[in-house]
Each structure stands twice: as structure tokens, then as C-alpha cells.
């Protein structure tokens, strides 16, 4: 069983920044992806950004140019730098390892207008 622990959420004004962190109990293997998902109030969970074992990244269109995903060399820790935050970024943010489907418990991000 893999454990994922998120931290770094909070309340921030629109235009501000936050940095989320996820600590994993093991590194990711080839073919696996670490990612950040979010679930806004009353909506479905959606992919925000992901990073593969070889460092390839992918972003949702809504966050391109504002958010940056990064990880340490052994891929046991992944960060999400969120800049120029908007009220619509308000959500619970979850760390994930795919394709096995491991999830953290989430961290709340609230962006006030």
C-alpha cells in the first residue's frame, strides 16, 4: 500500500500563489505517473497536472502558464507551484499515482476574490 500525504493548501487572495507538496511512501516506477487532481465544490474530480517517471509533464488547459509541477529525482515528492490563482481554482487538491490509483486525503485550496 502506497501512502500519499499532501500539504500546503490554504486561503489566498486572487492573484496570489501557493505551493502544494505531496510526499509518497515509495518512488514511482516506469510507466507510472504522479499527478495532482482537484475537485471543486459540487463538481467532478479533474486532472490538474502530472509528471512521469522520466520527467514528462502534462497540464490541464485551465492551468497552463500558471501552475508548475515538479518532483525530486527519485520521484518520492512532488510539488505543485500555483501562481496567479483565481477563485475558480478553489477546490480540494489530491495527489495521485496512476495507473494503480493511489490517492492522498487532499488539501483544501480556497481563493478569495
Image: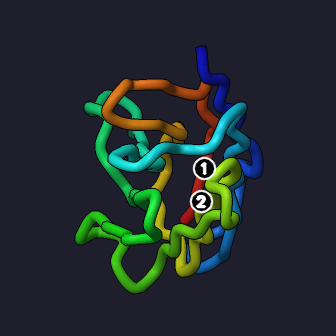
Q: Is residue 70 left or right of residue 6?
A: left
**How dense is the environment of label 2, judged by Cα within 10 Å: few (below 14), some, or many (20 and up)?**
some
Give the residue displayed 61% in from the left and 48% down from the top: 109
Seen from the viewer's position, the closer of residues 99 and 31 is: 31
**Residue wearing tag 1:** 110
Disc 2 marks which residue?
112
- Examine the rendered structure and indicate whether residue 27 appears above or below residue 100: below
Q: Secondary structure at mark 2?
A: strand
Q: Quadrant of residue 112?
A: bottom right
Above-or-below relation of 68 to 3: below
Instruction: Give how far across and how far down residue 55 sits, in percent.
Output: 46, 70
Q: Circle 1 sits in a helix, a strand or a loop, which is it? A: strand
Residue 61: name its quadrant: bottom left
User: Is 59 left, or right, of 51 in this rendering?
Assistant: left
Q: Residue at x 28, y 64 (%)?
A: 60
- Per the model, the C-alpha gap separating discs 1 and 2 is 6 Å
Amino acid at each position: 500500500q502506497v501512502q500519499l500525504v499532501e500539504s500546503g493548501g490554504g486561503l489566498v487572495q486572487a492573484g496570489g500563489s501557493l505551493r502544494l507538496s505531496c510526499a509518497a511512501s515509495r518512488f514511482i516506477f516506469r510507466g507510472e505517473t504522479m499527478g495532482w487532481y482537484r475537485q471543486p465544490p459540487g463538481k467532478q474530480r479533474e486532472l490538474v497536472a502530472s509528471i512521469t517517471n522520466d520527467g514528462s509533464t502534462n497540464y490541464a488547459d485551465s492551468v497552463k502558464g500558471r501552475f508548475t509541477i515538479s518532483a525530486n529525482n527519485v520521484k518520492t515528492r512532488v510539488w505543485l507551484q500555483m501562481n496567479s490563482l483565481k477563485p475558480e481554482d478553489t477546490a480540494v487538491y489530491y495527489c495521485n499515482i496512476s495507473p494503480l490509483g493511489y490517492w492522498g486525503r487532499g488539501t483544501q485550496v480556497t481563493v478569495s476574490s
